[in-house]
Structures are given as structure tokens and as C-alpha cells.
Image (cartoon, rainbow, N blue to C red):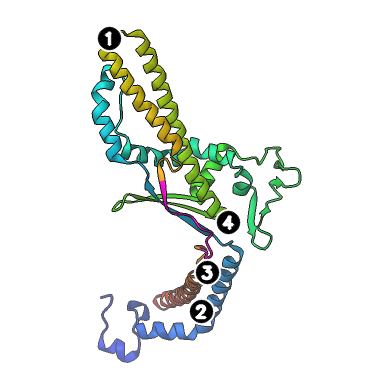
Amino acid sequence: MGGSYTESNVEKGEVHRGDEINIKEIFSVLSAGKWFILITTLIFSVTGIAYVLVKPNIYEANVLLAPANDESVVNGIGDQLGGLASLAGLNVRNNGANQTLIAIEVLKSRAFLSDFIRRRQLEVPLLGTTAWDEESRAWVYDRDVYNPVSGDWLADEQGRSYKPTAWDLVKAFKEDHLTVSEKKESSMIVLSVRSVSPTAAQRWAQWLVADINERMRQKDVSEASARIEYLEEKLSETNVAGMQRVFYQLIENETRTVMLANAKQEYVFMTVDPAVVPQERIEPKRGLIIALAAILGVVSGALIILLRFFLSEARQNEKMSG
């Protein structure tokens, strides 16, 4: 029976070593191959060191934001004028909380980010550079794809330009640079921007907050102005005193919206903790990477030795059984 031995087998030393794993023997094999494991560990460690030295530092700037809308005021106006607006064919929205959610989605939208990147001229920093020179505080350009002298994007051997499309720019920005998260317990929003340049990370974070506030302000002013124009048109068409009062109240409300929007700098998001130039990198975690590389070297070396040992044992057993 496989796995059981007779007394004579044991006395004669004819036990097949492949029938059970001897832990002591495995340690003996590993001890005999300690130099191979050491060399493997050294190779992996050197590779890990080379990797972290080549990989650029990544910095992250964070902005803590709070909703800037006073929901009690907005809801009060909506309650007071909702019925009047319905008579005029308008819909007054209680948009305190909804506006914040909409602004977050707009901030992450392809349309907003594409416009943001183009307007702030981030195309080259995003996809035309390889690093950031802290001493000169300037970008290191990827001269295989972009010519900083002429300001032109180069082309590949097939003549296809390296100039990125809006899709390429937004994808790179969302995947490599932008993170927007919400703290459920406090309704605070954390906007994080990562970059190889600590200065760029802080500046881009500030620009994003300013631009989303401006975008939402323009949107609300435009909509309120359109409603005022509509209400004034309806006002001129009616001679009913009661309806005229309704229209005057609605026009007053929309005018107030325009005035408040133009007077309020932080329209949707109020900055609680502004972005600062980060002084510590978040990536790469050099110590962790080197430690993992060393561990991987030890494990790989041990596995190779054990694999060779078991293959050798299997061949010996085949010869003995043959």
C-alpha cells in the first residue's frame, strides 16, 4: 500500500523518500542552497532599488471643501414661491444639496475637464513631459513626442501626430492626477491632485476649485437670466393685477439669484482647508518596494531550490521503480 512501510523495508533503508515530505530534510536542502537564495535576493533587491530610483516622485495636494449653499434659505424661497412659479409655468428647485451633488459630477465630467485642461494649457504638462526639475522649477519635456522650442507635437514613423486628443487628456488627468471623495459623516468633499511637480499639484487643485465654482455660477446666472426674460415677457402679456404681482415676485427672486451669484466668490464649494505645496511624496514608497523585492527574492530562490530538489527526487524514484 502506498504510504505504508514494512519493518523490513525500514531496516533495509528502502523507504521511498518521495512518499512523504520530511520538513527537516527540506530545511537541510534550503540550508545547502543558502548562497543561491542569497544571490537571488540580492538580484531582486538591486532590481527594486533600480526601479524606485528611476520612478519619479509623486506629490499630492489636497483641498477640503464644504457646500457653500445655505439650504435653509434656498428651501425657504422654494416653499414660498413654488406655488406661484407653477402658476407661471416655472419650476423653482430646492437645489441646496442637489447643486452640490451636481457640481461634483460636473467636476468629474469629460466636458468640464476637457475645457479645464485646454483653458489652463495643461496639454504639455500632462502628456508632453517626463519629469519635473525641482532646481530649475521647470518641466522636463519628452522630446520624442514634443518640441519645446517650436511648441509643436511630433509624429511617429507612420506620420501620426502625438498631439493628444481631448479623450487622451481627460483620461490621463482622471486616472493619474484627480481624485474626488466625499466624507459621508460630515458632507465634506476632499479634492486631491497628484503630480510629479508639487507646485503643479497645488496650483491645479486651486484652479479646479475656482473653475468649478465659476462654471456653476455662470450656469445659474444664465438660467436665472433666461427665466427673468421669460417672466418679463409674460408680465407684458397680462393685465391681471394678481398675476402681475406673481410675476414681479418671481422676477425679484430670480434677480436676487443673479445678484447673489455675482457677489459670491465661492459659489458652490467653500474652501475649508486650501491646497498647499506638498513637501513629502506619496509615491513611490521606496522602503516598502525594496522590502517586497527582497522578500520576493527569498521566496523565488527557495522555490527554485525546492523545485529542483523534488524534480531530482522524482527522477531517482523513477529509476528505482524502473
Q: Cα distance, mark 2 to mark 3?
A: 23 Å
Residue 234 image-quadrant placement? top left
Q: Is residue 260 at all visible to an observer of this figure?
A: yes
Q: On the rendered image, what quadrant is the C terminus found in?
A: bottom left
Q: Along the horizontal axis of the image, is 77 left or right of 228?
A: left
Q: Position of residue 243 (x, y in %)?
A: 27, 14
Q: Is residue 268 or residue 126 the one in the foreground?
A: 268
Q: Which mark is residue 107?
A: none
| Vertical arrangement, residue 312 with respect to residue 154, above or below | below
Q: Which residue is mark 1?
A: 240
Q: Position of residue 61 (x, y in %)?
A: 49, 56
Earlier in the chain: of badge 1 and badge 3, it is 1
Q: Cα distance, mark 3 to mark 4?
A: 22 Å
User: Is the stretch drawn in magenta largely helix, strand or loop?
Assistant: loop
Q: Amino acid at mark 2?
A: Ile
Q: Cα distance, mark 4 to mark 2?
A: 44 Å
Q: Which mark is residue 199?
A: 4
Q: Along the horizontal axis of the image, is 146 left or right of 65?
A: right
Earlier in the chain: of badge 2 and badge 3, it is 2
Earlier in the chain: of badge 4 and badge 1, it is 4
Rate crowding at label 4 as few (under 14), some (14 to 19) or many (20 or more) other CA atoms within 10 Å.
some
Q: Cα distance, mark 1 to mark 3?
A: 76 Å
Q: Which residue is mark 3?
A: 286
| Vertical arrangement, residue 108 with respect to residue 39, above or below | above
Q: Which residue is mark 2?
A: 37
Q: Amino acid at mark 4?
A: Thr
**Magenta residues?**
270-281
Element under label 3?
A: helix
Rate crowding at label 3 as few (under 14), some (14 to 19) or many (20 or more) other CA atoms within 10 Å.
some
Most extreme residue toward the bottom is 11
Q: Is residue 279 magenta?
A: yes
